[in-house]
Image: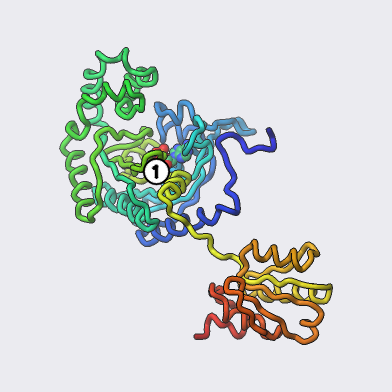
Amino acid sequence: MFNQAPKGTRDILPSEVYKWQYLESIFSTLCAKFGYKEIRIPVFEHTELFQRGVGDSTDIVQKEMYTFNDKAGRSITLRPEGTAGVVRSYIENGMASMAQPIKLYYNISAYRYENVQKGRYREFHQFGVEAFGSAGPEIDVEIISLLSMFFERLGLANTGLNINSIGCPRCRDAYHEKLKVFLRPHLDELCENCQNRFERNPLRILDCKEESCQKIVAGAPLLPENLCGECGAHLEGVMSGLDNLGIVYRVDPQIVRGLDYYTKTVFEFVSENPGSQGTICGGGRYDGLVEVCGGAPTPGIGFALGVERLLMELDSQGILIEEPPVMDIYIATLGHKASDFAQRLVYELRKCNVGAETDLLDRSLKAQMKYADKKGFLYTIVLGDDEIESGKGVLRDMRSGEKKDVSLDSIIDRLKKSLLVAPEPCRTCPSDPTQQK
Ligand code: HAM
């Protein structure tokens, strides 16, 4: 088994990594336009951070964390999500004394010991944002609009936005009592998990996926109708802000989210395509979390999106991410002289940011051309003794089949002029054609 990836993990292979890079670049560009800066946090943290931050009563902390003692006996946990680590960093790095709001985004791997199934892994990846220092509904709207614009840029349809408010500790405590009064006569009919949740966190019973529990909670008192004045006004503010931007949403009183830190706004983007992996993204406000983690009381809000689930959704909607052509020219060679010349040429081309390769396996010309074709090079040129002697070769456009005589001395300039994909500006090359019109 040592030579198989552990259950719930997978390699992202070269044949698919371009899709990840594409999503990463769209997400980071968009975040930058919204004024969010990237943060990179450690893969592991002190276990206590997640116990406090994510919450002792959550499935994540109770059952799913990868926790171990390091060599000095400290309890360490692989991050099961990004929010707690970002909050720790906000406090530790004194971000509270910088210009507010602090707006951050991240692209991380995360680790949960889950029952592995479609769209549910033990190592998975999240794009996320977190914003600190702003208590009003405007930032809730900004964050939701960032996400909705991201989906729009990717061409995704049918990703429904569901929002709710789970109130503040004050109105939620009162609601818990009401909910318990409603559920108590049905306690025996609830699934085992929900029977355990009844005292610890009755709110979670609302989003249990068991049919028997769903039937019972269908008649339960609804959260939005039991909010205090402040939380009710906040929800109204989020709704009118989304209306103002024309973002379509549905208020779903049953969204409660699986992490303890949420207050007021919670939201999810859920695939409405049959057979899809449900929730692509979840988030919400966490006005008490910075304080719970040892900082001054600071409002916060964010979301995280599962990258594997997003890719599955794009796939199921038939949205193709095109593989960019990576390599520009393949120099095929016949004989040692040509091979030496090709090594130099490839080196010079690469200096000018042209993607170039030549044979490294002493293959026949036929095998070299087969390789160039498979790898999708834009151009090829064959060099043998004759070409080296005459200083001329034939450049072939692999897509059109068109052939052009070129002088080997001027090949770099010629190539750069004829390449469809403009090479990066080159600082060392005196006649950089990317500067010419
Ligand atoms: P979460 O709902 O636990 O929230 O995860 C967010 C997203 O990560 C999910 O919607 C899903 O797409 C993806 N995800 C979660 N677990 C797995 C898994 N085992 N396999 C594959 N994908 C998974 C959070 O993590 C919060 N930190 C979000 C947040 C940020 N709230 C405020 N700020």
Q: How many marks?
A: 1
Residue at 36% from the left image edge and 24% from the top image edge: 210
Give x and y (percent) for residue 389: 80, 85
Give x and y (percent) for residue 265: 27, 41
Residue at 51% from the left image edge and 54% from the top image edge: 19
Circle 1: element type: strand
Give x and y (percent) for residue 422: 54, 75
Task: Locate residue 158 relative to residue 242 in the image: left or right.
Answer: right
Residue at 32% from the left image edge and 51% from the top image edge: 143
Task: Locate residue 349 relative to residue 262 in the image: left or right.
Answer: right
Query: Which residue matches tag 1?
Result: 280
Q: Nearer the viewer, residue 413 or 368?
A: 368
Give x and y (percent) for residue 297: 32, 41
Q: Nearer the viewer, residue 54 or 348?
A: 348
Q: Quadrant of residue 301?
A: top left
User: Residue lying farthest left?
Assistant: 229
Ligand 1 closer than 8 Å to label 1 CB? yes
User: Residue lying farthest right?
Assistant: 336
Structural crowding at the residue carrying mark 1, measured as other residues with C-alpha within 10 Å and reported as few (<14), some (14–19) or many (≥20): many
Task: Locate residue 296 relative to residue 371 in the image: left or right.
Answer: left
Q: Relative to 178, does residue 91 appear above or below in the rendering? A: below
